[in-house]
Amino acid sequence: MRPLRDLRVSLTDRCNFRCRYCMPKEVFGADFAFLPHHKLLTFEEITRLTGLFQELGVRKVRLTGGEPLLRKNVDDLVRMLNDIGVDDIALTTNGSALNSDLAKRLKTAGLRRITISLDSLRDEVFMAMNDVHFPVSKVLAAIEAAKEADLNPVKINMVVKKGWNESSILEMADYFRGSGCILRLIEFMDVGSTNGWRLADVVTAEEMVSLIQTHWPIHKLPPNYAGEVALRYEYEDGQGEIGVIASVTQAFCGACTRARLSPEGKLYTCLFGANGLDLRALLRSGASDDDIRLAIHNAWLNRDDRYSELRSSLTFSRTKVEMSHIGG
Ligand code: SAM
Ligand code: SF4
Ligand code: SF4
């Protein structure tokens, strides 16, 4: 059995962006039925569940979404998790709501690491990808706010989709080299069932690494810990690190230690799962800690997920939970 080490908690299925590769407007339009507020786990419920996950081995918690900073007072949740002894608390955000004040509050509450998503330095490319005309400058300001709040090293997630933003890779690498931030180039994935994924739209990790190599020599670094998702590289001229996430072309299911909690409290043991175990029902029916811990333990014990290793034309047309619902 693969150990349970990481918990990703999706705080909401809502987002103010409509990234083409995640929440295409045609599907997530004005009449899309997002979860009503009473169905979302409260911060108290998330904290209680996280405590049980900790007892089962979880050491790292990442808050994600949808856009997690659309939930009010996320720093309160960070503090509550910190208070129960989670010392590695991370957050992934599109940066739209992150200013200096919030970055400092998150840091003070105990946030250790932050990842901010940005797909290009060019407004025309970025706006076409986020599909809500959100400008690059505001995300760059959020990145600066995170750096100032000492959430270093800030990681930058760039999803690369062929024909859209591969021409931005070198500019992004150049901008973030030597900045103290770690750029991570991500292969476009077949998450969910709505983003129109095609293998032909994937720029492979190998292609991305070769492109960087032609400009700045890099060499591989060992993983920071077993099961690390990104392949790490270091610039040979001392300008820091760059990462590549090759979930399509170099599957890493064998080392996958991540459980995922959806905004309404379902436990998924794989990013590409179709159904989750309803922990909210247990929580709200008065189940004891022992009952809930056992349910989580059994779900993990019975886990045989290795979607990325099995990926084929048959698997990617399956119905799967949306990335904007379960979080990256
Ligand atoms: N809204 C936040 C954000 O964008 O950072 C957090 C949630 S988002 C689902 C988490 C990460 O998943 C982001 O870095 C996003 O770029 C990435 N992502 C979304 N759809 C993807 C896809 N189809 N393939 C690869 N990565 C994807
Ligand atoms: Fe929103 Fe993040 Fe999905 Fe973009 S990737 S639509 S910012 S949840
Ligand atoms: Fe883990 Fe599923 Fe991704 Fe494989 S496909 S690495 S099991 S989340």
Image (cartoon, grey):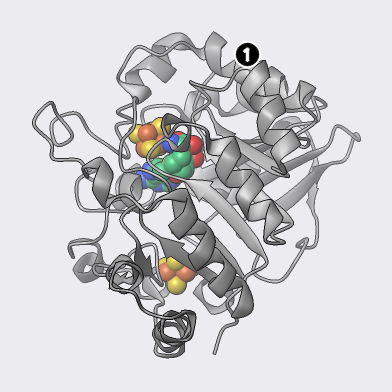
Task: Identify the residue shown where x is 73% and y is 35%.
Answer: 107
| Left or right, 74 with reference to 66 | right
Query: Residue 192: x, y in percent?
Result: 26, 53
| Left or right, 249 with reference to 240 | left
Number of marks present in the image shown:
1
User: For the residue labelled by badge 1, is the local secondary structure a helix, a strand or a loop?
Assistant: helix
Picture quarter containing residue 230? bottom right
Picture quarter containing residue 17? top left
Instruction: Name the one closer to the observer, 24 or 246.
Output: 24
Relative to residue 239, is residue 249 depicted above or below?
A: below
Query: Residue 114: x, y in percent?
Result: 65, 39
Task: Identify the residue shown where x is 58% and y is 68%.
Answer: 51
Question: Within 10 Å of the Cα at label 1, are there few (<14), some (14-19), or many (20+) other Cα atoms?
Answer: some
Task: Identify the residue shown where x is 48% and y is 45%.
Answer: 64
The answer to whether residue 242 shows anywhere in this view is yes
The answer to whether residue 188 shows anywhere in this view is no
Relative to residue 246, is residue 201 depicted above or below?
A: above
Query: Residue 146: x, y in percent?
Result: 70, 26
Relative to residue 277, is residue 190 depicted above or below?
A: above
Report the residue marked by disc 1. 141
Instruction: Name the one closer to the observer, 24 or 64.
Output: 64
Residue at the right extreme, as displayed: 238
Residue at the left extreme, as displayed: 31
Q: Quadrant of ligand 2?
A: top left
Query: Residue 210: x, y in percent?
Result: 64, 43
Instruction: Name the one closer to the observer, 327 or 210.
Output: 327
Task: Identify the residue shown where x is 41% and y is 77%.
Answer: 306
Quadrant housing the N terminus = bottom right
Type of amino acid under label 1: Ala
